[in-house]
Image (cartoon, grey):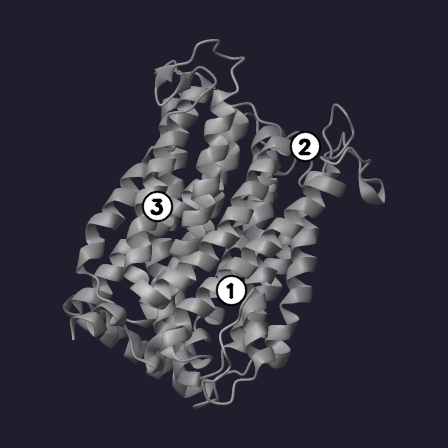
């Protein structure tokens, strides 16, 4: 994977690689915990049933997102006033690692469900907050012209890390309860008990260990912002600056529109990731192995999409990359929601129940979701940097987290409430139909984000106009 040249100030190559490895370190959290292993395991084996699991998972991730939404802009403004970001990353990394590791105790059968959901919420809180401050380091590493390439390369590297961690879990740790064998036909390593689903539960400790190991180069080699002032005075200054930003934000049309647009399309993407595995387990009756193969495919295309998106960002600007990605993701979400064992695009399938067409359609959707998801997340980081001065970048990423989390908790809550609503006895829907109806808010969120995007400007767009 090519890396942007270290020509911005005195940042060494190892410092840039250290920053990029943060995405490698954190991606297993999204891949193993949020999407492809632990989430479907929770819904299928810990929760009472798949629909109830989807509902509870929505509340847990929503609570974690709500905590970030309420505090990230304030802490981001304070960090801008004080300077260094690494101390913040360390604190939230500890929270995330401990919470992920504790998921090992999520045994099948619904024991201590409340504690499991608390750990999930804390994991979301810690891992996502660490990313806020890591993202804020990006503009200090390379020139503006190289930010798209840097962001895309980092996201691509992250997807490769997620892929490798997924192969490790599925190939050597997580076994099917009926066969006792992993995806590679092996017995689980370390004597992991297939009947107790220890391979699936081990995704939690593995995520924590992986993160703790690979985040070290960022702490050791990536330069941090210098300290500007003591923390005591910075709190007042940060809050004052944040208040001033919020007051003038509606007048900054492009910045405000970007925050609103990204709020909706990122939440739709996060919901698609978070509930895709649960949906496949409940509606298509996929095993953890099938979901894992789906995840491997999505991570491969995600790495390619992030890498290619970074190059397109550099040539055409991040706004075009984001727009095309939203369109692709919307169509993929529609394909997912319209697919069951009996239907494809809401049309009956001949030989329903035995046909492989639903599986093929879901894999195709997963490939495009991975590619478009990788490119849109990388391009969004550079599009945000276009909206603010360097002195306000951590605050901006705090507001970016706020705008994303404002609907990241509304999105899962909406899915949780809708799923529970349609699963009630008053409607008489099956568990599968309740799951389908429960995830339809994803489509609306993507479309709202797309409608708001034309009001956003990028420096690439302004340079072209001049």
Residue at 43 percent of width and 78 percent of height:
79
Q: How crowded is the residue under tag 1: few (<14 C-alpha within 10 Å), some, or many (20+)?
A: many
Name which of mark 2 and mark 3 comes first in the sequence.
Answer: 2
Q: Which residue position holds label 2? A: 108
As helix, strand or loop, the secondary structure at mark 3 comes to: helix
- State left or right for residue 291 relative to residue 248: right
Q: Report the disc number at residue 154.
A: 1
Q: Nearer the viewer, mark 1 or mark 2?
A: 1
Give residue 98's mark. Answer: none
Which secondary structure lies at badge 2? loop
Q: Residues within 10 Å of mark 2 (few under 14, many from 20)?
A: many
Q: Which residue is mark 3?
A: 410
Q: Nearer the viewer, residue 255 or 315?
A: 315
Location of the N terminus (image quadrant)? bottom right
Against 428, residue 255 (above or below) is below
Q: Is residue 59 visible?
A: no
């Amino acid at each position: 994977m090519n890396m942007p040249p270290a020509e911005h100030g005195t940042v060494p190559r190892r410092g840039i690689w250290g920053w990029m490895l943060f995405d490698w370190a954190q991606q297993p959290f999204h891949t193993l915990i949020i999407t492809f292993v632990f989430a479907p395991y929770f819904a299928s084996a810990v929760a009472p049933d798949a629909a109830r699991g989807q509902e509870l998972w929505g509340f847990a991730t929503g609570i974690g997102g709500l905590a970030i939404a309420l505090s990230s802009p304030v802490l981001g403004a304070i960090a801008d006033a004080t300077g260094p970001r690494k101390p913040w990353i360390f604190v939230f990394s500890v929270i995330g690692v401990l919470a992920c590791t504790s998921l090992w105790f999520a045994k099948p059968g619904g024991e201590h469900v409340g504690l499991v959901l608390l750990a999930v919420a804390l994991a979301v809180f810690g891992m996502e907050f660490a990313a806020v401050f890591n993202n804020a380091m990006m503009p200090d590493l390379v020139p503006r012209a190289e930010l798209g390439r840097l962001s895309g390369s980092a996201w691509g590297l992250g997807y490769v890390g997620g892929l490798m961690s997924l192969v490790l879990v599925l190939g050597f740790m997580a076994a099917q309860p009926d066969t006792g064998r992993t995806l590679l036909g092996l017995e689980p390593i370390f004597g992991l008990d297939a009947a107790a689903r220890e391979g699936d539960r081990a995704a939690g400790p593995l995520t924590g260990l992986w993160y703790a190991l690979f985040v070290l180069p960022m702490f050791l080699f990536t330069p941090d912002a210098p300290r500007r002032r003591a923390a005591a005075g910075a709190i007042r200054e940060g809050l004052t600056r944040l208040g001033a930003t919020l007051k003038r934000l509606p007048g900054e049309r492009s910045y405000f529109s970007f925050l609103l647009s990204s709020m909706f399309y990122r939440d739709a993407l996060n919901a698609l990731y978070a509930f895709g595995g649960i949906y496949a387990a409940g509606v298509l009756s996929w095993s953890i192995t099938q979901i894992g193969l789906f995840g491997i495919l999505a991570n491969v295309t995600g790495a390619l999409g992030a890498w290619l998106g970074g190059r397109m960002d550099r040539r055409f600007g991040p706004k075009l990359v984001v727009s095309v990605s939203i369109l692709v993701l919307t169509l993929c979400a529609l394909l997912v929601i319209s697919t069951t064992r009996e239907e494809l695009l809401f049309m009956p399938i001949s030989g329903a129940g035995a046909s492989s067409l639903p599986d093929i359609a879901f894999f195709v959707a997963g490939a495009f979701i991975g590619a478009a998801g990788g490119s849109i997340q990388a391009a969004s980081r550079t599009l945000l940097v276009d909206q603010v001065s360097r002195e306000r970048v951590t605050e901006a990423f705090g507001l970016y987290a706020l705008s994303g989390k404002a609907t990241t908790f509304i999105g899962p809550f909406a899915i949780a409430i809708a799923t529970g609503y349609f699963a009630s006895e008053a409607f008489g829907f099956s568990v599968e139909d309740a799951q389908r109806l429960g995830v339809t808010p994803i489509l609306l969120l993507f479309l709202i984000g797309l409608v708001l995007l034309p009001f956003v400007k990028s420096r690439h767009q302004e340079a072209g106009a001049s």
